[in-house]
Image (tube, coloured by chain):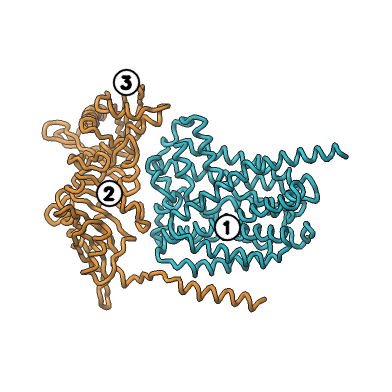
Chain colours: A orange, B cyan
Amino acid sequence: MKRKGLLIVSICFIGLMGCGVEKHILEEILIAEVVGFDEAQNNQIKGTTVVSVSRPGVEATRGKDVYQMVSHSIKDVRQTIGKEAPFPIVGGRLDVILYGEKLARKGLNSFMDTHHRDPNLGRDIFIGIVEGQADKVVKEEAKMTKTAGVYLKELIEHNTKTNLPENNFHSYLYSSHGKGMDPVVPLLTVKGDKVEIKGIALMKKDVYIGEYIPFNQGILFKSLYERPKGGSFELKWKENSYINISNVSSNFNYEISNANDRPSVKISVKMKGRLIEIQGDDLYKKPDIKKIEAIAERDLQRKMKDMVNRFQEYDIDPLAIGDRARSKTRNFNQKHWEDIYPTIPITVELDLVLIHEGISE
Amino acid sequence: MDIQPKVNKQISPYFVFFLISGMQIGVGMLGFQRIIAKVSGNDAWISVLISGVSINLLIWMCYKILSRNEQTIDMVGIHRDLFGKWVGGLLSSIFVIYFMGTAIVVLRTYLEVIQVWMFPDLNIPIVLVVMLLLVYSYITGGLRTVTGFMLIGKLFILLIMPLLFFPMKHAHLSNLAPVWDHSFMEILEGSKAMTLNYLGFELILMYYPFIKQPLRSKKCAHLGALFTTFIYVITMLATLIYYHQEQLKDVIWATLTFWKVITLPLVERFEYVGISIWLFIILPNVCLGFWAASRGMKRLFNMKQKKAVVVFMVISYIICILLNTRQDIDQLNTFVSQVGFYIVYAYIPFLFILQMIVYKVRERKK
C-alpha cells in the first residue's frame, strides 16, 4: 500500500513537470511599466512602452528603455516590439496606460476592451489622456530614473489625494459602462523636461470631448464627487491679497426630486477647512473668520455651480447625477432623464466652516 | 446486498454540514453573479436569498423520503421499492450519470479557469491525469476520507471570504438602492438561475446510509444549506456594490476579477493565489461526485466500487479532453445544470409525493 502511494506521488511530480507551461524568468523578460498609444497613419496605432531593464554589473541598477512600434492592434504592437527587444515584453505589472489626444477623441472603447479582456492586467492601473502625443510623456518617463518605481504612477497617485478624483482602471470601467455617469481621467502634458498634470479630462462615455477642469479646480470637482480629506483652495480676498484654505474633511448630499418628471437637483456640500495663508495689510489684527467664511462660500459656490452647468452644457455627467437619481427613484426612466439632463435646474449649496487657523493668531 | 455500511465506515452526523455546504460551493462561486444580475439587477441578492431558502424545503423533503422506510435509505433502494427492478434501475442509472456529469463539469470548468487566467498553454491531458490520480487516491479511502477532505476545503473558503472586504474601498452603496425595484417575477427568474449554484445537496440521496444516527444530522444539513446561502448572499452583495450592473454584464468571473484589486506587498496579483487555493475547494467536490456515482454502480450492479471509479475516470478523462473550447464547456455546463435543476425541483418533490401516496395505499391494503 505504501509503495502504491509513493508511485502515485512520483507520477504526479513527473506529470506536472511535463505540463508545458511557459516559464517567466525575471531576468529574461521586460516588464512594461507605462504604455502610451497614439494615432498613426492608415488607421494604425503607435504604441510606445517603457520597460525596466536590469543592467549588467556588480552594482546592478535598473535602467529604463523605450520601445515604439506601429501596428493595427494593441497586442500586435506588443508582438512587433519583439523585433527590437531582446526579451519578450510582459504587461503583468503595468502601472499607467496613456492615450494621445487624437485617439481619445475618437473613443477608447476598442482599446479598453483589450485591457479588460487581458487576465494579466490588474485593476489599479492609472488611465490618462495626454495633450498632444502620448509618446512624449512615455519617453519622459524613461528619463526619470532618480526615484525608484514608476514616476508617472507616483505623480498621479499622490495627486489623487488632493486634486484628482479616483481614476484607476476599475473606476474608468465602472463609469464608462454604467448608465447615468461618465468617466474622468487625468490630463497630462509635457512641460519643459517634466510631466505635468494639466487637469481632469472630461469624457462623454469613452470619448474625450476636448475640455478639461484645470488642475487647481480639481479639488472642487473632487468635493462634489467623493469625500476628500485634503487639498486646498486659493481665494481672492481683497485687491492683490489672497487667502488659502485647506480642506480638512468634506461631505456632500444630492437631493433629487421628481426624477421621472420634472427633476430638480440640489447639491449641498459641507466642508471643514483650515485657514493656512492670509495676505493683507492688517496682519496684526485677528482675521475676521466669519467674513472669510462668507467670502469663500460665495466664491466656491459660484465656481462649483459654473462647473456643474458646464457639464450640462457639454451633456456629460461626470458627477454621476443620473445614477444617483436612479438609486433614489423607483422605476427610473433613464431615457427621459438623458433627454432633459442639460436643462435640469441644479443648485449648489456650500457650507464652509473654518475650524482653526493655524498656531498663530 | 447489505444496504447499511459497517459502523467503521460511517461518519458523524455533524459532518453532513460540510458535505452539504461543501458540495454546493464550488467552481460556480467564481462567477455566478453575472447571470443572476442580468435578470434581477440590483435586487439579485434577494433572488439568491429566495432560492437559498427554497433549498431548505427540498432538503426537508429528502430527509422525509429517506427516512420513510428503514429498508430504503438510499436512492437506489427507494427507486427499486417504488418502481420495481427495471424502471427503478433505469432511473437510478440516470442519477449515476448525472453525478458523474457534475464531477466532470467541475473538473473541466476549473481547468478552463486555469487556462484562461494563468496558463493558456497548459497541457490538459497531463494535468488531468495528475488530478484524477489524486481523486482516485481519495475515493479509495472511502467516504470518510472524502469527508475529511471536504472539511479542509471549507476551511479554505472561510480563509478566502474576508478578502471580499478589500474591494470595498471602491464600494458604491447606492447601487443597491432602490431595493425591490424589480417585479416579483423578475426576482423569481433570478432565483431560478441561481438554483444551479445550490445544486450538490441532492448527493445526500447516496451518502445518507453512511451517516450515523441519520435523523440527528437533519439540523446540520439545514445549517449547511443556510451557510451556503449566507456565503452566496454576501458575495452577491459585495459584487453589486463593487461593479456597475452594466459593467457586470461583461465580467464572466466576477469573483476572480474582484481579487484583481487586492495588491499585497509580496503578491502583486492575488487572483493567482486564489485560483490555486480554489483547487482544494473543487477537488473534494469532484471526489464526492465520483464517489456517489461509483457507489450507485455498486448498489445497482454489485460492481466493485474501485473498479467503477476507474471506469468513470477513464470516461471523464476522455470527455474532458474532447471538450476544448469555451462554447463546448459552456454547453456541457448548461446541460448538466438544466438536468440538475429538473432533478432537484421537479423530481424530488415528485418522488416525495409519490412515495407518500404509495405508502398510504400500502397501509390501507394491510
Q: Are marks 1 and 2 in contact (CB under 8 Å)?
A: no
Q: Would you call the spot at circle 3 few (<14 residues within 10 Å), some (14-19), or many (20 or more)?
A: few
Residue placed at 29% from the left, 27% from the top? A349
Look at the image and tell me whether residue A235 can be seen: yes
Secondary element under disc 3, as helix, strand or loop, is loop
* Residue A285 vertical placement versus A106 (above, below): above
The quarter of the image holding the N terminus of chain A is: bottom right
**What residue sits right under mark 2 in the picture?**
A110
Secondary element under disc 2, as helix, strand or loop, is helix
Q: Would you call the spot at circle 2 few (<14 residues within 10 Å), some (14-19), or many (20 or more)?
A: few
Residue placed at 72% from the left, 58% from the top? B300
Please identify the quarter of the rendering in which residue B288 is found.
bottom right
**What residue sits right under mark 3 in the picture?**
A262
* Three-letter code, disc 2: Ser
The CA distance from mark 1 to mark 3 is 56 Å
Pinpoint the chain carrying mark 3.
A
* Three-letter code, disc 1: Ala
Depth check, front residue: A71 or A54: A71
Pinpoint the chain carrying mark 1.
B
Residue A322, horizontal then vertical, whole percent: 33, 32
Please identify the quarter of the rendering in which residue B142 is found.
bottom right
Upstream in sequence: badge 2 or badge 3: 2
